[in-house]
Every structure is written in structure tokens, then in C-alpha cells.
Image: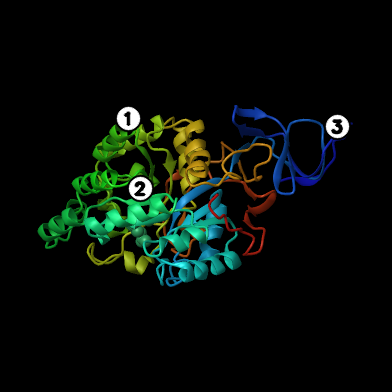
């Protein structure tokens, strides 16, 4: 893309570091043709005659706020053969994600000040995008003090009902958001014992039925004030969330692209590669989740980026580890969904940028607005390409979306600095820690 010195003088001019010119910029009033002026990493002005040291020509492009992915598993420390902070964050940057929130199920698990700090040190040295870190069940107060974005994902099936209540209450007492992976252990146990002898991949979905999500949601909703539900996967779960919201409950939820775009029929082609928790559901569930996303009762899109190596994923459905990579393909797939009129651009930007910044407490992120960080994604809406694993950057080296059409960013900017254009443009460690506000 054309980059040069960018002068534009006027008597009230602000001196800026960078101007993004000639693009259609997404602000609170939608897309408009304005120049975007950046100073000290923040948006300094929208429009107006200013001057800047450098210019980026965004002619023909739309300029969106950088996406936040509040649910990634970057596997570092402990499972760096699957992903690490560098590979995961480069994958994020290439996909237009400028902020991630990492989950605590690494090795050691994040559960107290020491393990939180250990991960924070790694992320600070290696991440190319900004990041929040979730704490895990354990010493919740300590992790709140260390700046945890939230507590979770709390895997409900790992805890007894009373332990879960205690975790949710401690999280609330510490002033933190609890993010809940809603699948009930009792329902899973029963389902698994009746399906374990079958080896077709769909047996895995039957072993963890929609009822598991419903029961876990009811339990979590009955014992906590404020909740965030990770990767909602069923129509019945969505109805419970709608009802809780209409009763005034403070509950938000996210959906992952894989639960929108795949269902049990897709096991036929991809088998255990499509094993994930919660598992694939039905076409009716896909349709309901799209509706929930469109209407906003599902506030957030998050990838649940959960990389595992292809050698592991090709095992028998019961042996393969659950999870699919997705941080790099989320925004590109959703821009394609906009193109196909599945969802409005405004709602996608809201679900990828504004709502996650608001719900997870990152006030400098989420919008192109004067004073906020200049985190930008430059998109050519006509540049449709097919997703190919060998062009992605995750250490997973495979994608469930192989061959699907998508619109990848031309350029990703973080705090006024181009971090990705055809390749990485900054050193690992450019990413900054976002302690929860
Ligand atoms: O499929 C999943 N994989 N779901 C989760 O909740 C965890 C994740 C992982 O860490 O592999
Ligand atoms: Zn997860």
C-alpha cells in the first residue's frame, strides 16, 4: 500500500504522526469518507486540515476499528508446540485482531499471583498485539489485583455445583467478570457413558447434548449476579439468555464462528478435526445463533482459538483433543458473511470491537474515536480469497475453514503503528498488557 510523507497545512492544524487518507472510516456514525489523524498512537482528529509526518493512502478501502478476540488459547506457557505468544499474536495481527484475551488453561494453569505474573512476563516479551489475561479459579483476589481481565473460562464440568457457586461468588466479590464455559458435568458423564462405545464423530455431540449447556446455564444464572457466557452453542441456551436478559439479569454472551458455520453434518468431511467443546450442534442451532448475533442478544464474536496439531486431531473422536484454531479467520469470515447479507457490518463491528471493549473493560479500545487508541484494520471489500492453511500464521498449521471464502485485511495498525501488511512489521513484544480498568 502507498505510504509517504503526508502534509496538509491549515492555521488550526494539529501536528500528527500519521494520517490515513481517502478511506471510508467506520465511526459511531457509520462509514464516512474522512481522513483519520493519529498522534502518539491515538486518534487525534477525524477530518480537518492537519499535518502529519507520514500518510497511508486508503483509497478504495474501508477502515474499521481493530478487532478484539476475548477468547484465545495461546498455549504459552506449557504447550508451545501448539502455539506460543509470538505465533498466536502474529496470527491475530494478520487477521485484523489487535487485542486478545488469553485463557488460563495453560501449564501451569493460571490460578494465583505467581502463575499470572509468569504468563504476563511471556506475553510482554513476545506478543505483537495488545492483550488482557484471564485469571483462573484459585486465588481470585490476587489475580484481580494483578489486573486480570476476568476470571475464566470457568469450565463448569470441572467443578461440583457447590465449588462453582463459590468460584462465581468470589469472582463477583473481587469485582471481576466471571466468564463461563457452560456444559454440565453430570449431563456429560451420563451422555458419555451411553455413547462411548460408538466411534462415529457425531457420537461426541450426542454425548454432550444441548441439555448440558442448558443445565449449566441455569446453575450459573442462579448463583451469580453478573456473568459472561463463552461460546454459546444452542438455540435452547440462547432462549435462556434472552429470558434472563428480559428479567433484567446482567448477562452477556459470545458465539464462535465455528458454531455459526458448522454443524454435525460437517463431521462427514472433517471428522475429529471438528471436535470441540461445546461440540457441533444442528442446522437449527446455527440458524438460531445467527439470529441471536443479528439481534444482539449475542453481544460478542470470539474465536475460542484452540490450536492442536494435525497429528493429534486425526485420532479417534474420543482421543483427539477438542478445539479448532480461529483467531486469524474470524474477522475475514465475518466480513464475508456481511457480503452475503447474513449480518450487517455495523453489528459485526459492534460484536468484534465495541462490545468486547465495553464488557471486558478496555476503554481505550473498540472504537475509532478521538482519544482512543488508533487500532485499525484496512479492508478492501472486493478482495475475496479462499482460506488456505499454508497462508495462515498459527503453529496449528491447519484450519477447519480450508477453501472457504473470506476477506482478509490489507493492513493492521496498532496504536498508530502498522503491525502487519503482507508480513509482520514490528518486533515481538510490541503488544502491551491491558490491565482491567
Ligand atoms: O474446544 C475447546 N478447546 N473448548 C474449550 O473450551 C477449551 C479448548 C482448548 O483449550 O483446547
Ligand atoms: Zn476456550
Q: How far separated are the C-alphas under marks 2 and 1?
A: 20 Å
Q: How far separated are the C-alphas under marks 3 and 1?
A: 49 Å
Residue drawn 74% across the image and 31% down it: 47
Q: Is mark 3 within 8 Å of ligand 2?
A: no
Q: Is residue 385 left or right of residue 207?
A: right
Foreground mark, 2 or 3? Answer: 3
Q: Is residue 132 above or below residue 366?
A: below
* Residue highlighted by disc 3: 12
Judge whether residue 283 can be spotted in this image: no
Q: Is mark 2 within 8 Å of ligand 2?
A: yes
For marks 2 and 3, the one nearer the N-term is: 3
- Horizontal and vertical percent for residue 128? 60, 59
- Horizontal and vertical percent for residue 279? 27, 52
Q: Which is nearer the eye, 284 or 366?
A: 366
Question: Which of the 4 image quadrants contains residue 161?
Answer: bottom left
SS label for mark 3: loop
- Horizontal and vertical percent for residue 412? 62, 49
Disc assigned to residue 231: 2
Label 3 CA crowd tier, 10 Å (few <14, some 14–19, many 20+): few
Q: How far separated are the C-alphas under marks 2 and 3?
A: 48 Å
* Residue highlighted by disc 1: 246
Amino acid at each position: 500500500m502507498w505510504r509517504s510523507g503526508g502534509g496538509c497545512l491549515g492555521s488550526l492544524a494539529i501536528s500528527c504522526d500519521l494520517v490515513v487518507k481517502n478511506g471510508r472510516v467506520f465511526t459511531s456514525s457509520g462509514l464516512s469518507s474522512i481522513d483519520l489523524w493519529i498522534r502518539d498512537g491515538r486518534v487525534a482528529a477525524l477530518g480537518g486540515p492537519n499535518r502529519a509526518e507520514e500518510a497511508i493512502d486508503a483509497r478504495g478501502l474501508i477502515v474499521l476499528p481493530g478487532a478484539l478476540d476475548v477468547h484465545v488459547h495461546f498455549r504459552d506457557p506449557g504447550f508451545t508446540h501448539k502455539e506460543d505468544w509470538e505465533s498466536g499474536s502474529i496470527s491475530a495481527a494478520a487477521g485484523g485482531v489487535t487485542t486478545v484475551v488469553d485463557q488460563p488453561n495453560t501449564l501451569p494453569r493460571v490460578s494465583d499471583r505467581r502463575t499470572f505474573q509468569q504468563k504476563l512476563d511471556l506475553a510482554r516479551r513476545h506478543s505483537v498485539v495488545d492483550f488482557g489475561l484471564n485469571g483462573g479459579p484459585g486465588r481470585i483476589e490476587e489475580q484481580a489485583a494483578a489486573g486480570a481481565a476476568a476470571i475464566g473460562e470457568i469450565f463448569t464440568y470441572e467443578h461440583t455445583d457447590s465449588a462453582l457457586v463459590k468460584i462465581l461468588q468470589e469472582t463477583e466479590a473481587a469485582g471481576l467478570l466471571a466468564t463461563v464455559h457452560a456444559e454440565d458435568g453430570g449431563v456429560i458423564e451420563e451422555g458419555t457413558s451411553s455413547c462411548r462405545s460408538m466411534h462415529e464423530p457425531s457420537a461426541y455431540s450426542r454425548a454432550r447434548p444441548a441439555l448440558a449447556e442448558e443445565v449449566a446455564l441455569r446453575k450459573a444464572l442462579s448463583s451469580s449476579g453478573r456473568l459472561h457466557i463463552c461460546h454459546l452453542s444452542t438455540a435452547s441456551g440462547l432462549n435462556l439468555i434472552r429470558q434472563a436478559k428480559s428479567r433484567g439479569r446482567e448477562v452477556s454472551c459470545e458465539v464462535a464462528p465455528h458454531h455459526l458455520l458448522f454443524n454435525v453434518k460437517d463431521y462427514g468431511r472433517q471428522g475429529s478435526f471438528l471436535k470441540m467443546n461445546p461440540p457441533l450442534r444442528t442446522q437449527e442451532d446455527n440458524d438460531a445463533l445467527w439470529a441471536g448475533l443479528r439481534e444482539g442478544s449475542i453481544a460478542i464474536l470470539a474465536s475460542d482459538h484452540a490450536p492442536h496439531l494435525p497429528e493429534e486431531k486425526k485420532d479417534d473422536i474420543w482421543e483427539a483433543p477438542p478445539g479448532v484454531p480461529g483467531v486469524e479467520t474470524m474477522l475475514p469470515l465475518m466480513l464475508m458473511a456481511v457480503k452475503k447479507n447474513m449480518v450487517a457490518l455495523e453489528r459485526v463491528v459492534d460484536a468484534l470491537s465495541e462490545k468486547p471493549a465495553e464488557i471486558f473493560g478496555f476503554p481505550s479500545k473498540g472504537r475509532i474515536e478521538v482519544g482512543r487508541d488508533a487500532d485499525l484494520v484496512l479492508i478492501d471489500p472486493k478482495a475475496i480469497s479462499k482460506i488456505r492453511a499454508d497462508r495462515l500464521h498459527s503453529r496449528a498449521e491447519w484450519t477447519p475453514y480450508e477453501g472457504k471464502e473470506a476477506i482478509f485485511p490489507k493492513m493492521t495498525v496498532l496504536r498508530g503503528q502498522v503491525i502487519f501488511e503482507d508480513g509482520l512489521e514490528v518486533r515481538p513484544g510490541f503488544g502491551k498488557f491491558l490491565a482491567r480498568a
